[in-house]
Image (cartoon, rainbow, N blue to C red):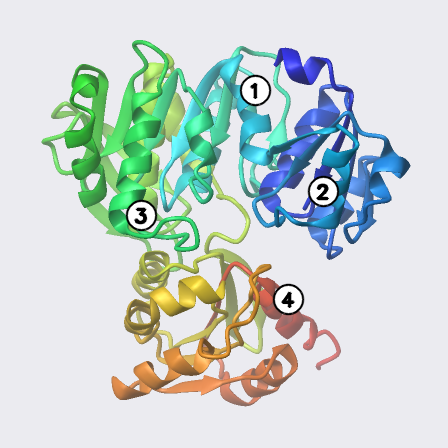
Amino acid sequence: MIELEEMQRIHLMGIGGSGMSSLAKLLASMGAAVSGCDLQRGACVESLESLGITCALGHSPGHADRFDPQLVVYSSAIAEDCEELVAARLRGIRTVGRGEALSWLFNAARGIGVAGTHGKTTTSSMIGLILDRAGLSPTFCIGGESRDMGTGARLGEGALFVAELDESDGSFEYFHPSLAVVTNIDWDHVDHFRSWGDVVDAFARFASGLKAGAPLVLCAEDEGVGVMLRKIPDAQGSILRYGWGRAWDWGAFDLCHKPGGGVSCTVCRRGEELGRLDMAVSGEHNVLNALAALAASNLLGVPFGLASETLRDFRGAKRRLQPLGSRRGVLVIDDYAHHPAEITASLSAVRKIHPDRRLVTVFQPHRYSRTAAFLEPLAAALGESDLLLLLPVYGAGEPAVSSVSSQGIADRIRERGRPCSLCSGEAEALEALDALLSEGDILLTLGAGSVSRLGGLFLSKGEGEC
């Protein structure tokens, strides 16, 4: 915090990413002169520019002269040999990764850190909203845009700081929460972690770095969490577990999926029934996310009644099973899922709220490294669609690998006897969807890349239809 207070001109490389744009908004709210650059102009960049933040297109050594920053913050997508980053260092400008910069703010506050391979954006959004409705005015910074808050970051007036902590590059180890949540531990980000064991070890180091006496809220249903716990025996006295049934500190049972969307369940704390939780968001994974949020907010003094009432209206983060609209009787849903476990959870949720509708999925694999590592699991998860369209791999900054493509997923899905079509890009996918979709179908777009545009493009094609 002291270091940031001394640096009023801050330049962010990769500012168009969801996590970086949230940090940019937070720094600007604190009074810093924020600038940034990115290779593409997207919705995040446009949102930042509307706030008066200058965003340059591309990375250039000349940005050091143009913006004269005292600090350069770079995303994990920026290569160490990027000319702009090298030029800043040669000029003696301090450079840090996004995670480290955010940790300076977080560690100086009463930090509520949400970590986990899956579900951390939704869970941190839930906690932030509950604390806000309770009048605690938290600062928050998440890796997506909260549909309820209308932003991914906001400077609050209270002492609490809710943050989504990213494990993808190991930077979550910079954070020392006053209260931490771990939703699950799965193997992902294979460019950084060589094995599942490496991921578990990183989470164990993170959990060992909490501030003295800080409680740790953990999902009791997750295998990786159980393995991590055996590596941090000293933390046993300050752990709260959540999961299915009555056996945990926080539990859920009598689950009901509501037709058309939403889920409800009965919640108990240490076996004592607290009441019914009725949510507009769907999926069993969101019940677990909600239990984590209820446990964390209760530790901070928020009663169950207020917290559950808040979650009843919770709409979630953008691109998390987000309904976009309908055209020709086809309901379009967009989701960020790109890991096999996330895809399985999203498809299961859609199936349970729309059991009688045909599910047509368009998936865009994210990163060549992830696609190569998870060919079989991706095929197994995606094969649950009634009809699947595959877009080319979205590299997300990784160089193309000739031996890795969507064809590998398609081959494995067809071996399972499931229908699958390859599309060369958005234009071909739109043409195929126009021919394939019928009234009553669900169109689900999945992936962390540009596939997010496809649902809107499909809907907009119908604007001139009679």
Q: Nearer the viewer, mark 1 or mark 3?
A: 1
N-terminal label among 4 and 3: 3
**Mark 3 Cα-neighbour bin, 10 Å: few <14, some 14–19, many ≥20:** some
Q: Is residue 398 left or right of residue 121?
A: right
**Mark 1 Cα-neighbour bin, 10 Å: few <14, some 14–19, many ≥20:** some
- What residue type is disc 4 on? Gly
- What residue type is disc 1 on? Trp
Q: Is residue 279 above or below residue 352?
A: above
Q: Position of residue 144 (x, y in %)?
A: 55, 43
Contact between labelled residues 4 and 1, with CB atoms less than 8 Å apart = no
Front in this rendered view, residue 401 or 53: 401
**Mark 2 Cα-neighbour bin, 10 Å: few <14, some 14–19, many ≥20:** some
Which residue sits at x=27%, y=40%?
200
N-terminal label among 3 and 2: 2
Q: CA distance from mark 2 to mark 1?
A: 23 Å
N-terminal label among 1 and 3: 1
Front in this rendered view, residue 185 or 346: 185
Front in this rendered view, residue 229 or 90: 90
N-terminal label among 4 and 2: 2
Determine whether the residue tagged by mark 4 lies in a helix, strand or loop: helix
Q: CA distance from mark 1 to mark 3?
A: 31 Å
Residue under circle 1?
104
Residue under circle 4?
456
Residue under circle 2?
86
Q: Position of residue 220 (x, y in %)?
A: 18, 36
N-terminal label among 1 and 4: 1
**Residue 251 visible in this rendered orientation of the protein:** no
Residue under circle 3?
285
Determine whether the residue tagged by mark 2 lies in a helix, strand or loop: helix
